[in-house]
Image (cartoon, rainbow, N blue to C red):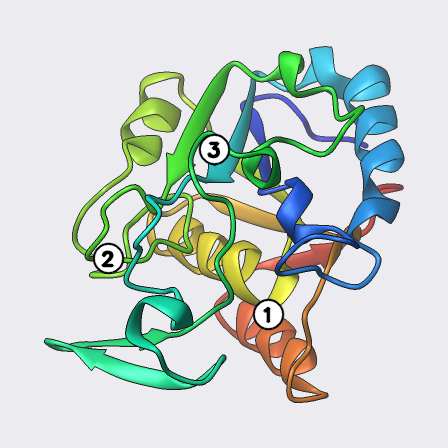
């Protein structure tokens, strides 16, 4: 990869529950672990900062369908927010919340744990889903004079997407590494729509050979 001066790599939610066999598995989620490790080993020192994120939910989280006794993937209202209901996943302190085995998470300069508020979900690495409560990532990146944000991980059409949108809104040059991400893509074609939205906002979709 090139143009890594003043750049940060943000690796999104490579966790057991999001990989095959997990409670909210993304098809092929495990396939990107070795390539991400290779990127970290080959180019990790070129990035000024490396950030990892992980979902880290309390047991009775607002986004869990089981908590509401409603159908999976249905949508409810919580005040002004729409909340998509998922299988129980990435519960704090459980094996499913751990990083996928072998992922070189020790390379991270910063770890952000998302979704800790039981009353609010959190997709983006930058904001909770109220779109007002910051995670602290923006300030961290600006403090270290980061201009370029490279994103990869799980899932492309959810947490990676929202992180890319917020990165662009905060004025960072934003690159989504598509071959190091995987999408849920439900309904089919949803991931393509998300990709087009990133491009319309000024983001770039690249691969790890960039």
Instruction: Tell me which numbered mark, 3 or 1, is placed earlier along the sequence.
Output: 3
User: Label 2 to label 3, Cα distance in Å?
Assistant: 29 Å
Q: Is residue 65 above or below residue 140?
A: below
Label 2, label 1: how far apart the Cα atoms are? 28 Å
Q: Give SS at disc 2.
A: loop
Frontmost residue, 57 versus 203? 57
Residue 94: image location, x then y, percent = 52, 34
The residue that appears at 50% across and 38% down in the rendered structure is 54
Density class for disc 2 (Cα within 10 Å; few <14, some 14-19, many ≥20) is some
Q: Earlier in the sequence, mark 2 or mark 3?
A: 2
Q: Is residue 18 left or right of residue 174?
A: right
Give the number of the disc on residue 166.
Answer: none
**Residue occupying the point 69% across, 52% down:** 22
Quarter assignment of residue 157: bottom right
Say if mark 2 contacts mark 3, CB within 8 Å: no
Looking at the image, is mark 2 or mark 1 nearer the viewer? 2
Label drawn at residue 199: 1
Query: Which numbered disc flags the more N-terminal residue, 2 or 1?
Result: 2
Residue identifier under label 2: 120
- For the residues labelled 3 and 1, the Cα–Cα distance comes to 18 Å
Labels 2 and 1 touching (C-beta < 8 A) = no
The spot of residue 189 in percent (x, y) is: 70, 87
Q: Decide: is 145 above or below 64.
A: above
* Residue on which the image places disc 3: 147
Q: Secondary structure at mark 3?
A: loop
Residue 91 percent coordinates (x, y)? 45, 43
Q: Residues within 10 Å of mark 3 (few under 14, many from 20)?
A: some
């Amino acid at each position: 990869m090139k143009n890594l001066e003043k750049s940060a790599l943000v690796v999104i939610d490579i966790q057991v529950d999001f990989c095959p066999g997990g409670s909210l598995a993304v098809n092929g989620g495990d396939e990107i672990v070795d390539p991400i490790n290779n990127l970290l080993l080959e180019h990790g020192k070129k990035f000024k900062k490396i950030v990892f994120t992980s979902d880290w939910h309390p047991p009775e989280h607002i986004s869990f369908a089981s908590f509401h006794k409603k159908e999976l993937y249905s949508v409810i209202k919580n005040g002004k927010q729409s909340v998509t209901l998922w299988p129980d996943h990435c519960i704090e302190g459980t094996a499913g919340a751990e990083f996928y085995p072998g992922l070189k998470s020790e390379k991270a300069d910063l770890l952000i744990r998302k979704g800790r508020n039981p009353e609010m979900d959190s997709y983006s690495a930058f904001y909770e889903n109220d779109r007002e409560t910051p995670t602290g990532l923006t300030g961290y990146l600006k403090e270290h004079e980061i201009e370029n944000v490279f994103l990869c991980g799980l899932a492309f059409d959810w947490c990676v997407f929202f992180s890319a949108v917020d990165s662009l809104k905060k004025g960072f040059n934003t690159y989504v590494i598509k071959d190091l991400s995987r999408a849920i893509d439900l309904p089919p074609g949803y991931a393509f729509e998300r990709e087009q939205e990133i491009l319309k906002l000024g983001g770039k979709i690249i691969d790890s050979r960039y």
